[in-house]
Image (cartoon, grey):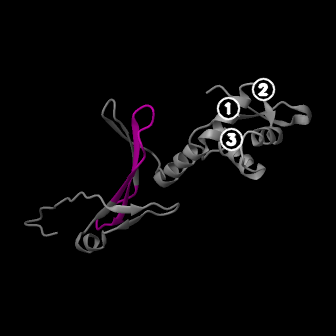
Amino acid sequence: MPTVQGAGLTVLGHTTKREGKEVLMFDGVGDIRDDVDDLFYISATEKDNKGNIIFTIKPDKFRCLAEEASFEFDSKNNVLTELDHVVDIGSINDAQEQLKKDAPIVAIILQLLGQKDYPITELVKTTRRHCHFGEKYLRALVERYLDTNLNSIDVKWVEKKQGINNTKMIGLGTF
């Protein structure tokens, strides 16, 4: 972009992108990338139930000292806070999509756990009677939303050690 007497020009644009599990592939930025000195990508989450948005700015091409950074924007109070760590927005968006897909089965499991705690194998077998999924898939789903899964975006149930022979039991927690 041409500049006069050291002035800079900032261009904001929206590109078509194909989201993948690992990398966003942006279409239509090849010419822009060749013509600019600095290029940053901004990825954001949807608003959460508190009205907060997390976004990450990732430098792709830069001449200055630039590092990837993440921010949280409180849309109710118009407050922007820089986070002390970089947030992988792609992983969060993938987890939110997975939660949407899992919602019907999560509802069944929550209903079952509202009645009593279960050993994981019994919980999987009981859940299987209410849906058409296999035990392997259902076990992975139960583990996906356990409180011990650090990558879980939304903890649904907790693992307790209170069964016979210290069996791990799954139950509802206090959140």
Q: Residue at x 39, y 33 (%)?
A: 51
Secondary structure at badge 1 equals helix
Instruction: Classify residue 90 as left or right of residue 164.
Output: left
Q: Is residue 9 above or below residue 125?
A: below
Secondary structure at badge 2 equals loop
Distance CA(mark 2)–CA(mark 1): 10 Å
Across the whole image, how many numbered discs are drawn on residues?
Answer: 3
**The magenta stretch spans residue 16:** no
Give the amino acid type for the residue marked by disc 1 in the picture. Answer: Leu
Give the amino acid type for the residue marked by disc 2 in the picture. Answer: Lys
Q: Residue at x 27, y 65 (%)?
A: 38
Q: Which mark is residue 146?
A: none
Q: Residue at x 73, y 30 (%)?
A: 112
Q: Which residues are magenta?
A: 41-68
Residue, disc 3: 148
Residue, disc 1: 110
Secondary structure at badge 3 equals loop
Q: Which mark is residue 116?
A: 2
